[in-house]
Image (cartoon, rainbow, N blue to C red):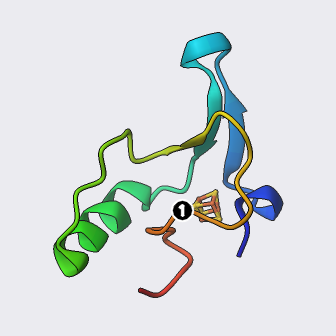
C-alpha cells in the first residue's frame, strides 16, 4: 500500500501547517499499537505523512500488518 494511491491520503492546510495527512479513522489506534508492539515513540502528529509525498506508507499504516 502506498499513501500516494490511498483514498485516505489528503493534502491539508498550507505553508508550514500544510502537508499530506492520513485521514483513516484508525490511524491513531494503529499508531499507538505500533508504539506498544515495537517499543518506539512516534515524535510527530500521527496523521502527518509529510510535507512531500512519501514513496511507501506510514510505518503504522492501519492497512498494513506489523
Ligand atoms: S498511512 Fe495507510 S491508510 Fe493512511 S494514507 Fe497512507 S496508505 Fe492510506
The residue shown at (82%, 62%) is 5
Counting from the top left corner in percent of width and height, residue 41 is at 22, 57
Q: Quadrant of the C terminus?
A: bottom left
Side of 29 where 60 appears, left or right: right
Side of 55 where 31 appears, left or right: left
Q: Quadrant of residue 55?
A: bottom right
The residue shown at (54%, 62%) is 58
Side of 36 where 20 appears, left or right: right
The residue shown at (39%, 47%) is 46
Counting from the top left corner in percent of width and height, residue 28 is at 35, 55
Side of 40 where 8 appears, left or right: right
In the image, is residue 49 above or below residue 66? above
Q: Residues within 10 Å of mark 1 (few under 14, many from 20)?
A: many
Counting from the top left corner in percent of width and height, residue 38 is at 24, 78
Label 1 SS: loop
Q: Quadrant of the N terminus?
A: bottom right
**Ligand 1 lies under 8 Å from the Cβ of mark 1:** yes
Judging by the rendered image, the residue that carries numbered circle 1 is 58
Counting from the top left corner in percent of width and height, residue 35 is at 23, 67
Furthest residue toward bottom: 65
Between 37 and 63, the one lying in front of the other is: 37
Ligand 1 image-quadrant field: bottom right
Q: Quadrant of residue 45?
A: top left
Amino acid at each position: 500500500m502506498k499513501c500516494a494511491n490511498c483514498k485516505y491520503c489528503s493534502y491539508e492546510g498550507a505553508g508550514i501547517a500544510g502537508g499530506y495527512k492520513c485521514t483513516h479513522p484508525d490511524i491513531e489506534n494503529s499508531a499507538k499499537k505500533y508504539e506498544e508492539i515495537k517499543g518506539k515513540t512516534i515524535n510527530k502528529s500521527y496523521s502527518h505523512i509529510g510535507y512531500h509525498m512519501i514513496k511507501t506508507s506510514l510505518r503504522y499504516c492501519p492497512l498494513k500488518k506489523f
